Image: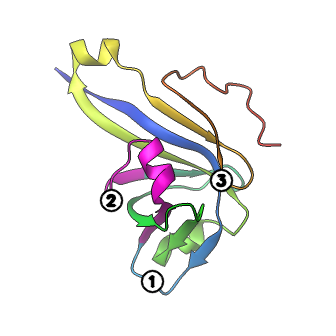
């Protein structure tokens, strides 16, 4: 049996741009992608904390160190600059692997700087971006 498991996330990143007339995707600072073990063109789920929108798209690497989080194409209608989002990736693994798996959690501050990185779903449980 295989299970679909939460692999990694960037928690409460702020949208810095929205580009409606761009071929769809989400642009994320390459440094943040690496911290969360995310690859270019990887499928991700996005949860908008401000408005409750949930959608799926794929990633495009943004300039390293820019802290860019940009909704592109139709996704630009799912959030506004300044909204907080959670970027989540999943993976498929065997039941045995799943029982030992620990996801990567990257917590960021209001400027999308990494505050904490861990391999525990308990990390930052009561995290405030302030």
Mark 3 element type: loop
Q: What residue would you read off at disc 2? A: 40
Residue at point 65% right, 53% down?
112
Q: What residue would you read off at disc 1? A: 22
In the displayed image of the protein, which residue is found farthest to the front? 65
Residue at point 35% right, 29% down?
5
Q: Earlier in the sequence, mark 2 or mark 3?
A: 2
Instruction: Judge by depth and name the residue closer to the eye, 117 or 73.
Output: 117
Q: Position of residue 123 (x, y in %)?
A: 61, 24
In the displayed image of the protein, which residue is found farthest to the bottom? 21
Single out the mark in the foreground, 1 or 3: 3
Q: What residue would you read off at disc 3? A: 112
Is residue 6 toward the left or the right of residue 15 in the image? left
Mark 2 element type: loop
Mark 1–mark 3 CB contact (< 8 Å): no
Q: Is residue 29 above or below residue 93?
A: below
Q: Position of residue 68 (x, y in %)?
A: 58, 65
Residue at point 22% right, 26% down?
93
Q: Earlier in the sequence, mark 2 or mark 1?
A: 1
State the CA–CA distance, disc 2 to disc 1.
17 Å
State the CA–CA distance, disc 2 to disc 3.
19 Å
Q: Check disc 3: other Cα within 10 Å, few if <14, some if 14-19, many if 20+.
A: many
In the image, which residues are magenta?
A: 25-44
Is residue 111 toward the left or the right of residue 47 in the image? right
Q: Image quadrant for the N terminus? A: top left
Mark 2–mark 1 CB contact (< 8 Å): no
Q: Check disc 2: other Cα within 10 Å, few if <14, some if 14-19, many if 20+.
A: some
Instruction: Judge by depth and name the residue closer to the eye, 74 or 87.
Output: 87
Instruction: Judge by depth and name the residue closer to the eye, 80 or 36.
Output: 36
Q: Image quadrant for the C terminus? A: top right
């Amino acid at each position: 049996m295989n299970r679909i498991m939460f692999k990694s996330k960037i928690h409460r990143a702020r949208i810095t741009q929205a580009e409606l007339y761009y071929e769809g995707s989400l642009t994320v600072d390459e440094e943040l992608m690496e911290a969360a073990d995310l690859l270019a063109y990887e499928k991700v789920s996005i949860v908008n904390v401000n408005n409750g929108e949930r959608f799926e798209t794929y990633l495009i690497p943004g300039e390293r160190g820019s802290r860019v989080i940009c909704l592109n194409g139709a996704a630009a209608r799912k959030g506004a600059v300044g909204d907080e989002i959670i970027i989540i990736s999943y993976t498929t693994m065997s039941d045995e692997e799943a029982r030992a798996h620990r996801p990567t959690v990257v917590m960021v501050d209001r400027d999308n700087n990494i505050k904490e990185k861990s391999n525990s779903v308990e990390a930052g449980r009561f995290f405030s971006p302030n």
